[in-house]
Each structure stands twice: as C-alpha cells, then as structure tokens.
Image (spheres, rainbow, N blue to C red):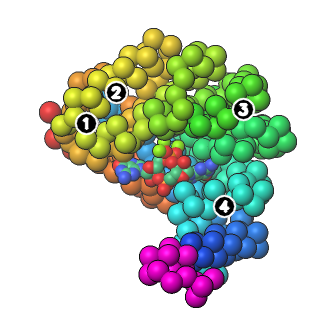
Amino acid sequence: LAKQNFRGTAVVFSAEHEAEISEQGRIQQALRAADFEQEMYLAFQPLVDTDTHGIFAYEALARWKSPSIGTVPPGIFIRAAERAGIIGKLTEVLMRKALEAAKTWPDHVRLSVNLSTRDVVSNKTVDALLDIIAESGVDPARLDIEVTETAVMRNFALAAENIRRFSERGIGVALDDFGTGHSSLSYVHKLPLTKIKIDRSFIVDIASNELSRSIVKTIVDLSRNIGCVCVVEGMETAEQVAVLRALGCRMMQGYYFARPQRLEDTLAYQAASDAILNASLRKTG
Ligand code: C2E
Ligand code: MG
Ligand code: MG
Ligand code: MG
C-alpha cells in the first residue's frame, strides 16, 4: 500500500496507519488468547479523606502483562476488549479479584471498581456482576461502581436501569471523569449517584487558571446539592491540594498521595498511612 504513494507525507501517513491497524490486531489477538485469571491483575490507588487524613477507599485499576506482547496500558486494552466483544468476561474476572482484595482491608475502607461503557448496557454482564458480588461475602455497601458520563449518555434508558440494579443492592455509584463527556446536567439527578469524580484535566492548571477553578467550584457545589460525595482525581502537588481544599473538596486521589500500588503494598501503606498522609497534608498549609 505504501509503495503506491508518491508523496512522502502520504507514505508516512499510510505506513503509520497500517502500523496502527496491525498493532490493534495484535492486541486483540493476544487478548482473545489471554488467560485473564493469570495475566490480568489490579493496581489499587487510595482515595484520601483530607479531613480525617485517612484512606476512604481504593480504586481498582486493571493491569495486563501479556507473555506475548508485554505490558499494555488499560486505556488501550479495555477499548480492545470492548471491540473484541470480551469486555464482560474481563470485567467479571477483575470484579472477582477486586472483591478478594477488599477482604484483606479493614471494613471501613471502600472499594471502587470501573465498569466499561459496554458493561453498563449489557443486562447479561450486570446479572453476572451482581451474582459475583453477592457470592463474594463482601458487604455491597462497601462497594462503588464507577461509570463514565459517556457510557451513560450512549444509551441512557438502559444504562440508568442497570445502574439502578446496583443501587438497589446498596452499591454506591460514582460518575467518573465528570466534566469531560457530553455533559447534560439534566440527567444527573435521574441517576442514583453517590459520588462524582472530577476529571484530572480540570486539576492540571487549577492553581493558575481562574476558569478551571470556577468550573471545579460549580461541580463541588452541584455534588453537595444532590447529596453526592465529590472526589477529585489527578492531585499531583501540594498547591493543588490546598486550592481544592479551599474550594470545599475533601476527598482526593492522585500521585501526590500515592500511585496505584500492588495489593501487598496497600497493606504496608495502610499501616503507615497516618504518618504518610499527615506529612503530605502538612505541606498543603
Ligand atoms: P480512571 O478510572 O479515571 O482512573 C484514573 C487514572 O488516572 C488511572 O490511570 C490512574 O493511574 C491515573 N492517575 C491517578 N492519579 C494520577 C495523577 O496524579 N496524575 C496522573 N497523571 N494520573 C493519575 P490508569 O490506571 O492508566 O487507567 C486509565 C483508565 O483506564 C481509567 O481511568 C479507566 O477509565 C480505565 N480503566 C482502568 N482500569 C479499568 C477497569 O478495571 N475497567 C474498566 N472498564 N476501565 C478501567
Ligand atoms: Mg475510575
Ligand atoms: Mg477517574
Ligand atoms: Mg480519568
């Protein structure tokens, strides 16, 4: 294909395009052949309560190390699993692993699990997930599912119905990456939300950008008005933490506090969390 083109740019474009397609193909092929139980694991990132300086929850984040193609980032393999039509099975395996992990933590520490766009609109996947949760022995009231705005808006009626099924079991519902999707405030109160997660993109320039600050302030106030816990993600500096505290946000997640970590390390982190979080939060003034 590349040979037929005369112009350098076209050749480059076409070669890149081909490379991208074959990369996608390779990933999907490796995914289809993957033993999820063996190759998939979770990293856990704490959500910190900056009032109590305690760990409020851990978010489970999927990791894949394929023996054939190596480490692939979740942003890539989750999409590939959706395209390959095997995301439901993957989410089920990850949910099971996440619940097992939560059993090793104290009962007051919550667990957050991400669902993909496809999961939320699949009655079959939701049935399976509810069974897995019920059989796990973990109190459903300790669990939150995270769904993105984009997922919900794609098929609102079906997504809302499935989200309600989680909610009826006492499971919390977090709206993830808030502010980045096709936002329509009119649907927010039609969902049984318990948590709103403000996307990292609003935090990056929060210390210098007045507009970001006022958007975040609006979301923090909205969360309070509809009775949701507000969480900001992507906190990387003491300055950002101080600004967010001043805007009335209490729950935070980000590299400033901790990177996603292996299960073994969550236990050590919890043991040391008083000292770690006190030291981090002292710097924020
Ligand atoms: P997300 O659910 O919004 O997760 C937060 C992402 O931000 C994570 O990336 C996390 O490592 C990263 N992050 C946290 N704090 C910071 C920070 O201070 N700075 C920066 N730069 N990044 C930070 P990760 O683990 O690469 O996951 C990316 C996305 O992939 C997730 O975004 C989520 O949409 C998706 N994902 C991850 N695990 C799963 C899963 O099990 N199921 C599904 N459906 N999606 C998942
Ligand atoms: Mg998430
Ligand atoms: Mg998020
Ligand atoms: Mg995000």
Disc 3 within 8 angstroms of ligand 1 (CB)? no
Residue at 65% from the left image edge and 45% from the top image edge = 116
Residue at 18% from the left image edge and 37% from the top image edge = 208
**Which residue is under mark 3?**
155
Q: Dot 2 lies on which element?
A: helix
Label 1 vs label 3: CA separation?
A: 32 Å
Label 2 vs label 3: CA separation?
A: 27 Å
Residue at 63% from the left image edge and 83% from the top image edge = 1
Q: Dot 4 lies on which element?
A: helix
Label 4 vs label 3: CA separation?
A: 20 Å
Q: Is the magenta stretch mostly helix, strand or loop?
A: helix
**Which residue is under mark 2?**
216
| Segment tinted magenta in the rendering | 1-16
Compared across the picture, whether 174 is left or right of 151 comes to left
Disc 2 and disc 3 in contact, CB within 8 angstroms: no
Residue at 78% from the left image edge and 56% from the top image edge = 85
**Which residue is under mark 1?**
206
Q: What residue type is labelled 4?
A: Ala
Disc 1 and disc 4 in contact, CB within 8 angstroms: no
First in sequence: mark 1 vs mark 4: 4
**Which residue is under mark 4?**
80
